[in-house]
Image (cartoon, helix red, strand yellow):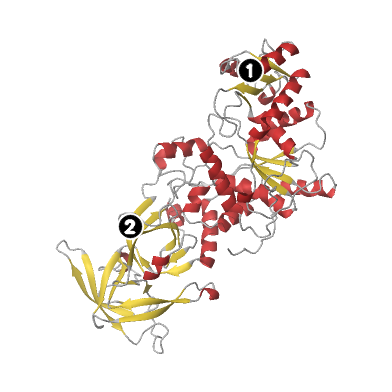
C-alpha cells in the first residue's frame, strides 16, 4: 500500500485548546477517543469524528482509543461492533506517519493522564475498549453518589419522570422520592442489581436542580433496569448506566484528556462536569469539547432513517454503495485516502452547516485520477465492422495504464476487424456540435485508427444494430502518419477478445439536496440511483483485483465488487461504479 504525502495539519479551535494545554504543561500529550454506540453502522459523519480524534493524536504524539459506548443492551449487537472495527481500521490504516496512538492489545486503561503508549499498529491488532468493561466501577461510582446524598432511587415510571421534568420555560416537579434516606436508596440499588425488580419500576437519579434552565440537570437518570442480555457482558447485569453517566466516567477511567463530541452534546457538558466534580476524583479530569457535525447534501445521516432504508429494503443492506455508511462507501470503491482527505480537512467549527457532497466527490475524483488504472469497457455495446480489414485481422496496440503515473507502464490491447463502441457514440441524426460517429463522419478510436462510417445496419424495428466502417490504416495512434486531426475520439473493445461483466452504475440516492427538509425523505429517492448493464470489457479486466481501482475511459471509475467477485451462475465479473468522470449533477443544479 502506498503512503500518501502528509498534508499540512488543519488548524481549528479544538487543536488550539490542545496546543495550549501542552504548552502549559497540563498534559504531556493528548489522549482522545472515538466512542461510537454499536447500534448501527458508521456513516460519513462519523468519518469526520474519526479523523478529528485520531488526527489530533497523530499530530501531537498522543493516543486515541476506540471505545464502544455500549450501555443499552436492547439496541446493540455484535454485528455492529465488528462492522465498526472494520470501518475504523480501513479508514485510518496506512495514514501517513502511523503514530496514531492505539493502546497495544492487553494494555490496561490508565487512570492517570500523562503516561502514553505510542505503538504504530493497526487497530486489528489492538483491543478496543468497552464502556461495559467498566460496569463494576460505574456501579461503585453510583453508590458513592448515593452515599454523598447526590443521587437517589426513584420509583416513578418513565412516563412520570418525563412529565415531571417540566419544560424550558417552567421548572420541573421534584420526585417525592428525592429525599429518600440514603440507606434506603443504597438497599434498593443493591436489590436492583440483584434482579429483584422488573424493568421500569425503579431508576437511580442524580440529585441536582429541578429548577435549572438546563433540562439535563433536572435530576437526570443515571441507572435503569433492563433485563436483557448484553452483547459483551452476557447476563451478568440487569441494570445499566445511562449514556451521560457512563461517558464521562469512561473518559476518566481511560485517562482521556480531550473528550471531543458533536454539538448536540454541548447542553450535556454541565452534567458531564457535575458528575466528575461531585465524585471528588483525583485530578486531572477530562474536559469535553464540541464541534459541528458533518451534514452532507443529497444524503441523510440519521441512524434511524438509515435503518428505515435498510429494513424497508429500499437499499440492499448497510453496505449498499448508495448509502453514506462507511461500509457502503468502501464497497463503492472510494479509497480510504479520499475519505480521509475530505473528512480531515473539511473544517471544524462551532456552528452547524450543510456541506456540498460535491466537495467529497471532488476528493474522490482527484484521488482516483492519480492512482486508478485505465481500461476500456463499453457499457451499451454497438457492433462496428471495419470492412477494409480481413476477417482474421488481429494486432496488439500499446495502451497507457495511467497518464498521471509514469511508473504504471503500458499494456497490450487487442484490436480486430469487429469492435464494440458505445451506442451513445453514434447518432444517425446528430445534434449540433456532435463530434462522434455519424453517417459519412469520421472519429478516432482511442489508441488505434481513424474510422469512417459508411453504412448503417438496422433490424426489422428500425433499431441500429451494426455500423460498417473503413479505417484509415495510415492514421494509427503513435504511427509516423498519425497526425491527421479529428475532433472526436471514442473508446472501444475488440469483439472477439472482449469479456462480459455486470456493471452497476450507482448514483446519488436522493434527488433533493436536503432530502429530509420537508419531513418525507423517501419521496426524494432517486429512481435512477442504480442501473445494471452487461458491458463488454477489454480482456485484461479478467484479472481485475478487488484492491485496485479502474478508470473505464470516458465513463467513470469502477471497482470489482467486494461482496461477489463472480456470480455463481454465469461467472460474470461484477464492477461497481464509484463515480462518474465529471460532475453530472452540476448542470442539473444550474437548471433548477
Nearest to N terminus: mark 1 or mark 2: 1
Identify the disc placed on residue 533: 2
Give left or right: position of 398 versus 387. Answer: right
Image position, residue 106 (x, y; %): 69, 44
Q: Compared with residue 488, is residue 153 higher up or lower down, i.e. above or below?
A: above
Q: Is residue 172 visible?
A: no
Secondary element under disc 2, as helix, strand or loop, is strand
Label 1 vs label 2, nearer the camera: 1
Q: Position of residue 127 (x, y in %)?
A: 64, 44
Q: Nearer the viewer, residue 494 or 441?
A: 494
The residue indicated by pointer 1 is 192
- Asked whether 520 or 14 is in front, the reply is 14
Q: Residues within 10 Å of mark 2 (few under 14, many from 20)?
A: some
Q: Quadrant of residue 587?
A: bottom left
Q: Quadrant of the N terminus?
A: bottom right
For residue 135, which numbered disc appears in the image? Answer: none
Amino acid at each position: 500500500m502506498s503512503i500518501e504525502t502528509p498534508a499540512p495539519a488543519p488548524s481549528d479551535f479544538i487543536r488550539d485548546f490542545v496546543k495550549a494545554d501542552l504548552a502549559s504543561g497540563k498534559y504531556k500529550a493528548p489522549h482522545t477517543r472515538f466512542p461510537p454506540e454499536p447500534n448501527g453502522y458508521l456513516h460519513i459523519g462519523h468519518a469526520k469524528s474519526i479523523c478529528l480524534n485520531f488526527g489530533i493524536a497523530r499530530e501531537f504524539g498522543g493516543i486515541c482509543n476506540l471505545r464502544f459506548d455500549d450501555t443499552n443492551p436492547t439496541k446493540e449487537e455484535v454485528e455492529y461492533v465488528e462492522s465498526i472495527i472494520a470501518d475504523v481500521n480501513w479508514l485510518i490504516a496506512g495514514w501517513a506517519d502511523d503514530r496514531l496512538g492505539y493502546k497495544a492489545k492487553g494494555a490496561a486503561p490508565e487512570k492517570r493522564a500523562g503516561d502514553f503508549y505510542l505503538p504504530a499498529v493497526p487497530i486489528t491488532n489492538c483491543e478496543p475498549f468497552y464502556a461495559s468493561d467498566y460496569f463494576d466501577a460505574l456501579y461503585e461510582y453510583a453508590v458513592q453518589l448515593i452515599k454523598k446524598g447526590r443521587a437517589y432511587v426513584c420509583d416513578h415510571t418513565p412516563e412520570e419522570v418525563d412529565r415531571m421534568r417540566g419544560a424550558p420555560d417552567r421548572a420541573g416537579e421534584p420526585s417525592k422520592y428525592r429525599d429518600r434516606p440514603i440507606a434506603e436508596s443504597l438497599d434498593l440499588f443493591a436489590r436492583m442489581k440483584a434482579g429483584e425488580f422488573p424493568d421500569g419500576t425503579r431508576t437511580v437519579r442524580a440529585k441536582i436542580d429541578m429548577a435549572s434552565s438546563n433540562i439535563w440537570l433536572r435530576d437526570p437518570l443515571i441507572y435503569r433496569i433492563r433485563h436483557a442480555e448484553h452483547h459483551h457482558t452476557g447476563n451478568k447485569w440487569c441494570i445499566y448506566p445511562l449514556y451521560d453517566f457512563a461517558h464521562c466516567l469512561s473518559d476518566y477511567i481511560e485517562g482521556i484528556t480531550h473528550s471531543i463530541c458533536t454539538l448536540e452534546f454541548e447542553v450535556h457538558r454541565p452534567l458531564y462536569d457535575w458528575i466528575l466534580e461531585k465524585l471528588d476524583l483525583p485530578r486531572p479530569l477530562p474536559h469535553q469539547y464540541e464541534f459541528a457535525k458533518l451534514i452532507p447534501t443529497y444524503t441523510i445521516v440519521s441512524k434511524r432513517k438509515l435503518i428505515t432504508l435498510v429494513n424497508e429494503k429500499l437499499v440492499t443492506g448497510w453496505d449498499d454503495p448508495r448509502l453514506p455508511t462507511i461500509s457502503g462507501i468502501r464497497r463503492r470503491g472510494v479509497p480510504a485516502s479520499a475519505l480521509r482527505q475530505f473528512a480531515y480537512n473539511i473544517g471544524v467549527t462551532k456552528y452547524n452547516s450543510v456541506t456540498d457532497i460535491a466537495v467529497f466527490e471532488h476528493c474522490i475524483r482527484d484521488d482516483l485520477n492519480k492512482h486508478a488504472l485505465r481500461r476500456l469497457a463499453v457499457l451499451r455495446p454497438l457492433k462496428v465492422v471495419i470492412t477494409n480489414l480481413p476477417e482474421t485481422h488481429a494486432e496488439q496496440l500499446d495502451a497507457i495504464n495511467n497518464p498521471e503515473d509514469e511508473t504504471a507502464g503500458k499494456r497490450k490491447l487487442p484490436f480486430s476487424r469487429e469492435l464494440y463502441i458505445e451506442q451513445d457514440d453514434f447518432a444517425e441524426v446528430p445534434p449540433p456540435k456532435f463530434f462522434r460517429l455519424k453517417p459519412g463522419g469520421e472519429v478516432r478510436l482511442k489508441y488505434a485508427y481513424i474510422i469512417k462510417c459508411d453504412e448503417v445496419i438496422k433490424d426489422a424495428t428500425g433499431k441500429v444494430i451494426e455500423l460498417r466502417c473503413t479505417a484509415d490504416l495510415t492514421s494509427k495512434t503513435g504511427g509516423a502518419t498519425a497526425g491527421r486531426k479529428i475532433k472526436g475520439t471514442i473508446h472501444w473493445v475488440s469483439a472477439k477478445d472482449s469479456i462480459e461483466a455486470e456493471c452497476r452504475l450507482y448514483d446519488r440516492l436522493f434527488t433533493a439536496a436536503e432530502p429530509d427538509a420537508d419531513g418525507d425523505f423517501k419521496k426524494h429517492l432517486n429512481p435512477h440511483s442504480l442501473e445494471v448493464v452487461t458491458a463488454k470489457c477489454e480482456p485484461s479486466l479478467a484479472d481485475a483485483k478487488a484492491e485496485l481501482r479502474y478508470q473505464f475511459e470516458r465513463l467513470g471509475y469502477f471497482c470489482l465488487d467486494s461482496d461477489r467477485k463472480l456470480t455463481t451462475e454465469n461467472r460474470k465479473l461484477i464492477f461497481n461504479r464509484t463515480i462518474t468522470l465529471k460532475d453530472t449533477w452540476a448542470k442539473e443544479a444550474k437548471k433548477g
